[in-house]
Amino acid sequence: MAQSQVSRLYSANVTHWDRMAQDIDQTPWGIAGMNIWKKLLPHVLQAAPFNKETSEVMDFGCGNGFNSSLLVPHSKSILGVDISSGMVDEYNRNMERWGLAEEGKFSAVRADLHEDGSSFAGKRFDIIFSCMVYHHLPSIHVTTKTLATYLKPGGYLLVMDWKKPEGEQPNYSDPINNIVKLPGLDESDMKNAFESAQLEFVGYNGEAATMDEMVGDYHLKNTAFVSWGKNDSPASTRM
Ligand SMILES: C[S@@+](CC[C@H](N)C(=O)[O-])C[C@H]1O[C@@H](n2cnc3c(N)ncnc32)[C@H](O)[C@@H]1O
């Protein structure tokens, strides 16, 4: 992807998600997103060893915090990271509203992980998860490599997203077209991304959440996968 296209996709995502952020949980897509996460959650908890006493977790592309909120009972801390300051504000507002803020243990920051000098540079996580973000990224390979550098030795990366559709491709209208890079990903896409980030590719569940419902006037008929990998290197791979 040319640098100008990368910048355009990035800016379109920031603009879109900033505009959508406030009270997104009351919109048709926000409600659909929560339904998807509720279906994915049991698979997520099975894939990685979440531990309330010890697990330091990152939610990459955290959105409004609903996903993190359901993992609070299984995590010592969760840091939400998102490029949209609107989403980060919504995440932090929701954690307060839901009584989960707990002295900053469950909070979000606006950051572009590909830039140096983030406020949490040097921090490492036991588990990083990312839900419905990969299809918005300019390069899943670049981002997976970056996320791998934030894992502790033995840490897990979990990625959830749409399976690459067979046959008829989804017909998104504007502005969704401008913020989506790929309609979905299959097992080999995920295996390649994990392995090129030097992570062990541990598993892929291609039937984790099947959706067949109207979202506004769009017929959402698709399946979301859970894929996961592990940082097997004895020391952190971060440069
Ligand atoms: C479809 S929403 C998913 C939000 C949340 N993970 C969920 O499942 O409800 C996509 C999220 O990814 C964020 N995002 C898009 N591109 C990103 C990037 N390059 N880096 C970090 N976050 C990104 C958006 O701001 C938005 O919050």
Image (cartoon, rainbow, N blue to C red):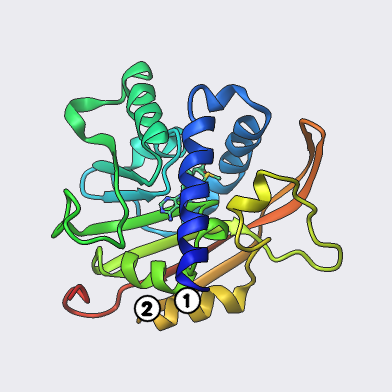
**Three-letter residue code for mark 2:** Ala
Q: Which numbered dot is residue 22?
A: none
Give the alpha-carbon distance from disc 2 to disc 1, as whole Å.
6 Å
> What percent of the width, then of the height, locates residue 238?
20, 73
Of the pair 184 and 76, the residue shown nearer to us: 184
Q: Is 168 on the left or on the right of 9, as rendered?
A: right
Question: For the view shown, which residue lies furthest in the front direction?
Answer: 4
Classify residue 3 by image quadrant: bottom left
Categorize mark 1 by other alpha carbons within 10 Å: few (<14), some (14-19), many (20+).
many
Asked which secondary structure carries label 2, the reply is: loop
> What percent of the width, then of the height, locates residue 164?
70, 66
Q: Quadrant of the C terminus?
A: bottom left
Instruction: Please tell me which residue is depicted at 61% across the width and 55% down the height of the picture.
Output: 180
Instruction: Please tell me which residue is depicted at 71% across the width and 55% down the height of the picture.
Output: 223
Of the pair 206 and 7, the residue shown nearer to us: 7
Question: For the view shown, which residue lies furthest in the right direction?
Answer: 168
Label 2 with label 1: CB-CB less than 8 Å = yes
**Residue 69 in view:** no
Question: For the view shown, which residue lies furthest in the left direction?
Answer: 122
Instruction: Please tell me which residue is depicted at 82% across the width and 33% down the height of the picture.
Output: 217
Q: Which residue is mark 1?
A: 193
**Three-letter residue code for mark 1:** Ala
Classify residue 197 by image quadrant: bottom left
**Residue 19 in view:** yes
Q: Which residue is mark 2?
A: 197
Asked which secondary structure carries label 1, the reply is: helix
Q: Is 225 on the left or on the right of 169, as rendered?
A: left
> What percent of the width, then of the height, locates residue 191?
52, 78
